[in-house]
Amino acid sequence: MKKYMIRCDMEGISGIVSYEQADPKKSEYQYGKKLFMSDLIAAVSGLIAGGADEVHIYDEHFFGRNIDLSEISSISSSDKIFVYMGKPPYEEDWAGGLTSDFDGLVLLGFHSKKGTKNALLNHTYENDIEDILVNGISVGEIGIETMIAKQMSVPLIMITADSEGVKEALQLEPEVIAVSVKESLGENSAICYPSNRTSQVIYDKAKEAAQRKWNRPVEDYKTGVHMKIRLADTIYSKEYLKMFSFPEFREKTVLCCWAKYWQNKLKVMEKL
C-alpha cells in the first residue's frame, strides 16, 4: 500500500504575497484560502492519480483550520484522504500522524526561513523565532519537517513554494521534485501565475512523485541531536525564559527536540 503525507502551509501557495491573504483574521483571507485549496486539491489529486492508496494531510498553518472539507470531498477517491485539523502538537513519539510506513512526504505551500534575503514572506514557524540550529546548521520549517521525516526513513518527495523556498529545499534534498509557484521579488512581492497553470503543474508533479521509486533515507545522528532555538525579543520570549531555560535540547531525534519545545511553548501561551 502506498501512503503519502502532505504537510501544508499557506505563505508559499500560488498567488499569496501578503500576510493579509494568509491570516484568518484579515479581510483577504478568504481569497487566500481559495488559492490554498486550489493548490491542495491539485496535489492530492495528482498523488491519487499516481497510485496513492492513502493521502494524509496535516494542516500546519495558523490553528490548522484552513482546509475546506467540502471541497476535499469533491475529489475522486476521497475515501483515500485523511485530514489532520486543529494542528495537534507533535509529541516525542508522534509527528502529526507521520510514521515510518509512509512512502513519502510532500511539503505544500512552504517558504524560506527567516532572514532569507529578498525572500517572500520569509519566517520560521512564528515571529517569536529568529533561527533554529540543528547540530550547528541553521534550518527553517522546510529543514525541520524534512529532518523529522528522514529520521523515520521517509523521503521528502515534493515541495511547492516560492522560488527562494524551493532553493532552500534543493540545498537540503537535491533529488526532491520542486515546484516554484511564484518568483520571489522581495518580502511582500512576487511574480505570480494564473492558478490554473500552477494547479496543472502541481498535479503533474505530484503524479510523477507518486510514480517514482524513491530510496528510503537513513538519517542516524550517532552523536544525537543538539537543537538551539534563538528567540526574538518579545513578550513570549521573556515569559519563556522565566518558565524555562534557554531553548536548547539534546535528544536522539529532531522530533524529540522539536516536540519538547512545542510542549513548552503551549505552557507559555497559557500564561500570556
Image: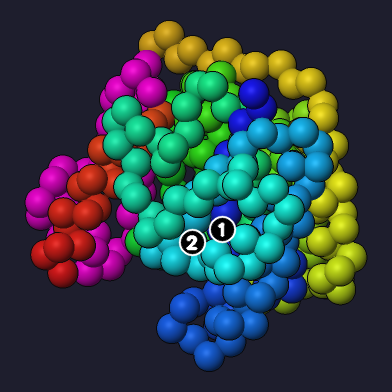
Nearer to me, 199 or 55:
55
Residue 80 covered by magenta stretch:
no
* Relative horizontal placement of residue 139, taking residue 165 as reference (left or right): left
Residue 250 covered by magenta stretch:
yes
Residue in view at x 49 percent, y 12 percent? 220
Is residue 18 shown to the viewer in this render? no
Quarter of image, res 156: top right
Q: Which residue is mark 1?
A: 9
Amino acid residing under circle 2: His
Label 1 secondary element: loop
Residue 131, given in percent of the width and then of the height, sits at 44, 49
Residue 84, given in percent of the width and then of the height, sits at 45, 51
Q: Is residue 26 above or below residue 66?
A: below
Circle count: 2
Mark 2 nearby-residue class (10 Å; few <14, some 14–19, many ≥20): many
Mark 1 nearby-residue class (10 Å; few <14, some 14–19, many ≥20): many
Residue in view at x 74 percent, y 73 percent? 15
The numbered dot on residue 209 is none
Label 2 secondary element: loop
- Placement of the N terminus among the 4 image quadrants: top right
Residue in view at x 16 percent, y 69 percent? 272
Q: Which residue is mark 2?
A: 61
- The span picked out in magenta is 224-253
Find the distance from the CA under tag 2 to the CA under tag 1. 5 Å
Nearer to me, 53 or 216:
53
Amino acid residing under circle 1: Asp
Quick check: marks 2 and 1 in contact, CB under 8 Å? yes
Q: Earlier in the sequence, mark 2 or mark 1?
A: 1
Is residue 57 shown to the viewer in this render? yes
